[in-house]
Image (cartoon, rainbow, N blue to C red):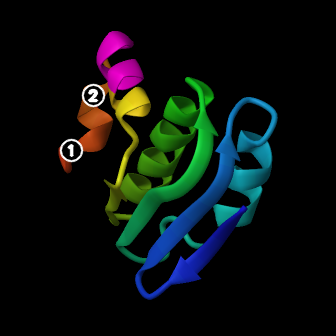
Amino acid sequence: MNGKEGEGLVLTGPLVMDTVHEVLRQTNGAVGKADLIIDFSRTTDIDSSALALMMQWRRVAEAAGRTVTFANVPDNLRVLAELYGVAFLLDHHPLPA
């Protein structure tokens, strides 16, 4: 589902409700340990559950004093982030309190 490349994590395959729990399990050890870039370039299907996963990654990273940056975010996920009012996830700004 994902692979580590340098200081980043490359997601592969679908990122949908049926897969996000497994992706979270697989990435749990990397997020919060160092500043991290999560690359969406190899994802296939994506739904709104990816937004919840992104929020969780950001929470874990911020609690550890680290950052998570998202790269190559697909257009459909950008549209969903705008629609749900969480476009800040795509920026480097801290999560709202």
Q: Is residue 80 magenta?
A: yes
Asked if residue 2 lies left or right of residue 96, the reply is right
Asked if residue 48 is positioned above or below residue 2 in the image, the reply reads: above
- Looking at the picture, tell me which residue is in the foreground, 58 or 5: 5
Asked if residue 53 lies left or right of residue 61, the reply is right
- Looking at the picture, tell me which residue is in the foreground, 82 or 97: 82
- Residue at 28 percent across and 41 percent down: it is 90
**Label 2: how many Cα within 10 Å (few below 14, some 14–19, many 20+):** some
Residue 78 at x, y = what percent?
A: 33, 30
Asked if residue 68 lies left or right of residue 15, the reply is left
Identify the main secondary structure in magenta.
helix
C-alpha span from label 1 to label 2: 7 Å
Residue 28 visible in the picture: no
Residue 11 at x, y = what percent?
A: 58, 60
- Image quarter of residue 68: bottom left
The stretch of residues the image draws in magenta is 79-84
Mark drawn on residue 41 = none
Q: Secondary structure at mark 1?
A: loop
Q: Which amino acid is tagged 1?
A: Asp
Residue 85 at x, y = what percent?
A: 30, 15
Asked if residue 8 lies left or right of residue 93, the reply is right
Q: Is residue 92 magenta?
A: no
Asked if residue 60 is positioned above or below residue 47 in the image, the reply reads: below
Q: Secondary structure at mark 2?
A: helix
Residue 76 at x, y = what percent?
A: 42, 28
Query: Label 2 belongs to which residue?
Result: 87
Asked if residue 60 is positioned above or below residue 21 in the image, the reply reads: below
Quadrant including the N terminus: bottom right
The number of numbered badges drawn on the structure is: 2
Q: Which amino acid is tagged 2?
A: Ala
Query: Label 1 belongs to which residue?
Result: 91
Q: Are marks 1 and 2 in contact (CB under 8 Å)?
A: yes
